[in-house]
Image (spheres, rainbow, N blue to C red):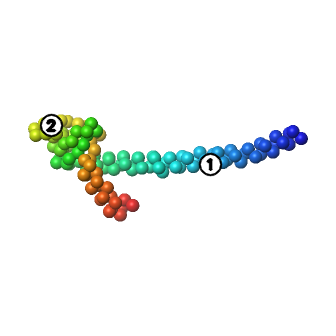
Amino acid sequence: MVYNLIAVQEAAGGGAGIMNLLMIVGLIVVFYFFMIRPQQKKQKEIKKFREGLNVGDRVITAGGIYGKIRNVKDTTIILEIADNVRITIDKGSVYPSASQAQEAVKQSENNPENK
């Protein structure tokens, strides 16, 4: 009789294992759509921006320095931060200025290819 009771409890516990597995899969899906996917999308936009840098563009460095691009090389940029004051920085530390970022967002919202 005791063995029958244990067998019934084990059978009931099997369904709970499946529910636990479904909950874990559900959490992974939620993390993907609310955290991972938007971050990947943002990284693609920044990469596209960095590939399209041109002389004369205004940018912000990761350190918060505002400037205008004077020369673009493979991995570096010469940035003018004041009259006749130029620094060489890595392309990976460049972000669009606030106004350019807003314009890019507006363009992507109006572009039907991005939807």
x, y (%) of residue 24? Answer: 59, 45
Evaluate if marks 1 and 2 touch, with contact meaning CB atoms under 8 Å apart.
Answer: no
Q: Is residue 96 above or below residue 62?
A: below
In the rendered structure, which amino acid carries the disc numbered 2?
Arg
Residue at 27% across, 56% down: 103
x, y (%) of residue 19? Answer: 66, 48
> Cα distance, mark 1 to mark 2?
57 Å
Q: In the rendered view of the protein, which quadrant contains the N terminus?
A: top right
**Relative depth, front residue between 44 and 3:** 3
Neighbor class of circle 2 (other Cα within 10 Å; few <14, some 14-19, many 20+) is: some
**Relative depth, front residue between 21 and 51:** 21
x, y (%) of residue 72? Answer: 20, 43
Where is residue 59, by image quadrant?
A: top left
Label 2, secondary structure: give it. strand
x, y (%) of residue 73? Answer: 21, 41
Relative side of 48 to 66, left or right = right
Residue at 71% across, 48% down: 15
Visible residue check, residue 91: no
Relative side of 30 to 88, left or right = right
Tag shown at residue 22: 1
**Relative depth, front residue between 61 and 50:** 61
Neighbor class of circle 1 (other Cα within 10 Å; few <14, some 14-19, many 20+) is: few
* Total numbered circles: 2
Tag shown at residue 86: 2
Label 1, secondary structure: give it. helix
Q: In the rendered view of the protein, which quadrant contains the C terminus?
A: bottom left
